[in-house]
Amino acid sequence: MRVLIPGIAGSIGRLVAMRLKQGGHEIAGVDRRPWHGAAELGIEVHEVDIRKRAAEEVFRRFRPDAVVHMATVTHLTARSEDRYRINLYGTRAVFEHCHTYGAKRCLFVGRHTYYGAAADTPLYHPEEDPPMAVSTFPELGDLVAADLYAGTALWRYPAMDTLVLRLCYTLGPTLSGTLASFLRGKYVPMVLGFDPLFQFMHDHDAARAIVTALERGERGVWNVAGPPPMPLSTIVRRAGRTALPVAEPLLRFAMGRFGLPKLPRGAVTHIKFPVVIDDARFRAQAAWAPEHDAEATLDAFRRAAPL
Amino acid sequence: MGLLHDPEVAERVERLELPFGPDGFDPWGVSKRDLVRWMSVLAWAYRHWFQVTTEGVAQIPARGRAMLVGNHSGGVAIDGAMVIASMLLEPEPPRLAQGMAEKFIAGLPFGSLIGRMGHLTGLPEHAERLLRDDRLLMVFPEGARGTAKLYWERDTLVDFGTGFMRLALATGAPIVPFAVVGGGEAFPTVMNLVKLGKLLGIPYLPVTAYLAPVPRRVPISIHYGEPIRFEGTGREEDEVIMERVEVVKQRVAALYADGARRRRSR
């Protein structure tokens, strides 16, 4: 299969590309960021913006059978105007090019934070739950919109198989992603009196899930998670860090100061309340299960990020 | 140790038939460690402070989904706490009764931590999923109106909600009716301060006859009745549901009347 990966230079993008390559697929990627060493692996990477004409040219020449769209910006520090444009216009461009140049499958990699965290949201969201993140964490609005937009391809392009995956946090050797960044320092801030359940999966399991979905997943929207969730305080301790419970008003003030990570306002809600998804449907239809349990995943993180 | 570690409680927690992982958490975040700690406190209150007597424990299904449905009283849900303690301490094998907490609780600091003991925010999604997980759900269909009963209303039942019946029908869970007698005397509420409660982020602040928000040392008894099984889908018309709710309410009222009569004659 010829697979094109917009957003290939990200950590999970690279793992997906290498895994697909090992599986005998032909791989090309598009990313604004470079991936030095991709050529040696036999992977062609085009350093272009997904929204630009040059990216369409890659679709025209490479004629992918399948596309894995990972070119969404999640760094909340990125200027939001720029992020909105990349995430929304970029996603539109990917689906249009897929349609125009005859891709048979297009997979959008989204995030479980779509469902949002609040005191009154249930644990174990099924896929049909509404995207409460727009109210609990407004800064994630563009990612929610991109996810919903990707889902519209299911009816707009019925001849193409569209899959939308909502992945929980990833953790492990790449040290990339929201949770890994949050756990990076010696002290990890928590909101005093709150200890939400967190769901995470090993970086390699995330890549495996994407590859599995691409190779044998059915069209539709799927939650993808790893081992059962754990309280944040346990994750912090098992990652070899020290939890620093701070009263909420103080925490909002201290974020970005005293060596604590800088987080947008909505992020505080996401360390107060859980976002836990039900991934039973994906496991059943794709015959998939994570290979790494919580312990192995946290060990991998701890080894990669010693203090 | 001591009050926070009752060896019998620890042994019974160990025998709970729940899928605890290697870290001692089940998929809902119920923590073995926290269970031992706080159930030890509840067990002390159960045995020594309220000297609870429990009848009809044999009615509780040993495993599989079931719903405990009973009366509320006494300002701060002492009844719920004692039902939870009785389910851990009395039946063989022990069971974890999981309550549905008022929504405001999860928003309070330390409030959501009752989730470590299995008590999740009262959402239909949680209740249904717990039952499908073959858990033992504890329901007070009178809701917050039940705990708001004043001392002289302690022998009465206010209207039952109907959600629990639809849930029981949809999941095929048997309903075990129960009555807690003595809760209203243990926490004799004479007034509920609604405005002050709102300021504190809670529905109301109960005030006892002696002002201090401490339960009195009075005996409590819990009476479990025979499980009732209803056939249906949960999508029946309101009138059908109301009739069945009334059946459960009457059973709870009968268990209560019987328990209260025997308490007076003691």
Image: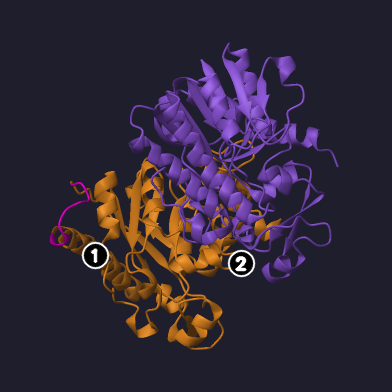
Q: Residues within 10 Å of mark 2 (few under 14, many from 20)?
A: some
- Answer whether residue B238 is magenta in the image: yes
Q: Which residue is mark 2?
A: B109
**What is the span of residues highlighted in magenta in the rendered image?**
B232-239
Q: Residue at x 55, y 59 (%)?
A: A138
> Considering depth in this image, is A176 or B188 the residue closer to the camera?
A176
User: Which percent across, then down, holds residue B260?
Assistant: 32, 72
Q: Residue at x 44, y 82 (%)?
A: B188
Using the rendered image, report if marks 2 and 1 lie on a common chain: yes
- Rendered position, A54 above or below A180: above
In the picture, one chain is purple; tell me its letter.
Answer: A
Disc on res. B249: 1
User: Which percent across, then down, holds residue A256?
Assistant: 77, 60
Q: Residue at x 36, y 75 (%)?
A: B145
Q: Amino acid at mark 2?
A: Pro
Q: Chain of mark 1?
A: B
Q: Could you tell whether A176 is left or right of B107 in the image? A: right
Q: Residue at x 80, y 33 (%)?
A: A303
User: Which percent across, then down, holds residue B178?
Assistant: 33, 60
